[in-house]
Image (cartoon, helix red, strand yellow):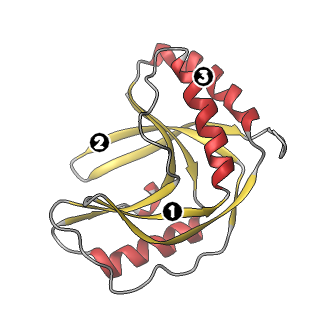
Amino acid sequence: MRLFFAFDVPEDVRLALWRYSMENFQDRSSKIVAPDNIHVTLKFLGEVRENGFSKLREKAEKATFSAPPFETKLGPYKLIGNRIGCTEAVSGESYFLRVWEKLEEELDNIGYEKEKRRYYPHVTLVRFKGKPVKPESSIPSTSSFFIESFKLYKSELTPKGAIYSEIECFPLKGDKNG
């Protein structure tokens, strides 16, 4: 099954971002992320056998000690390459990075290849199939929110889009000086 680790975004923020996407990107050359699928990706794992869950849990648990719960805020609209429209985290980046680095290190120990690109905490809003559409308005200012955990999700691809199901939650347990 396809798995990934992610940080959740509160429902009110997800809905505000989805409404923004619907107002600015609704055309045939784009695929808007469904409100329930809006999150900050931590690590995409790809296909994983169920017998690999215990090792994933063990490694994820070790990563929880790399950062405490923290506050973050999302910023303006950005385009990544010519395919991804997103909003990036504009506060709490060092905490996102701590968790990502530790999880990368732990997963590398059990055969998951380390990401070659720099980690960029962001929320994907839209994927463009053709030329990207420039938004007509700015992303609405969202309130800051706390990240208290990350989760392991299953991603099931369907003709109507991906369906994400939470498998397990990993509360952050680190300290601020970490």
Question: Gap between marks 1 and 2, in whole Å?
Answer: 25 Å
Direction from residue 65 to residue 40 in the image, left or right: left
- Residue 60, x across and y down, in percent: 63, 28
Asked whether the residues under the numbered discs 1 and 3 touch, taking CB atoms below 8 Å apart as contact, a structural biologist would say no
Circle 1 SS class:
strand
Name the residue at 19% across, 74% down.
27
Say whether disc 1 or disc 2 marks the residue closer to the N-terminus. 1
Q: Is residue 147 above or below residue 78?
A: above
The amino acid beneath tag 1 is: Glu
Q: Quadrant of the N terminus?
A: top left
The amino acid beneath tag 2 is: Leu
Viewer-nearest of discs 1 and 2? 1
- Residue 65, x across and y down, in percent: 76, 33
Direction from residue 49 to residue 107 in the image, left or right: right
Circle 2 SS class:
strand
Q: Nearer the viewer, residue 161 or 46?
A: 46
Say whether disc 3 or disc 2 marks the residue closer to the N-terminus. 3
Residue at image mark 2: 157
The amino acid beneath tag 3 is: Glu
Residue at image mark 1: 88
Residue at image mark 3: 106
Q: Is residue 72 above or below residue 170?
A: below
Viewer-nearest of discs 3 and 2? 3
Q: Is residue 16 above or below residue 169?
A: below
Question: Gap between marks 3 and 2, in whole Å?
Answer: 27 Å
- Residue 38, x across and y down, in percent: 46, 58
Asked whether the residues under the numbered discs 3 and 2 touch, taking CB atoms below 8 Å apart as contact, a structural biologist would say no
Name the residue at 63% across, 54% down.
93
- Residue 52, x across and y down, in percent: 49, 16
Q: Nearer the viewer, residue 1 or 89?
A: 89
Direction from residue 10 to residue 154 in the image, left or right: left
Question: Few, some or many C-alpha atoms within 10 Å of disc 2 (few <14, some 14-19, many ≥20)?
Answer: few
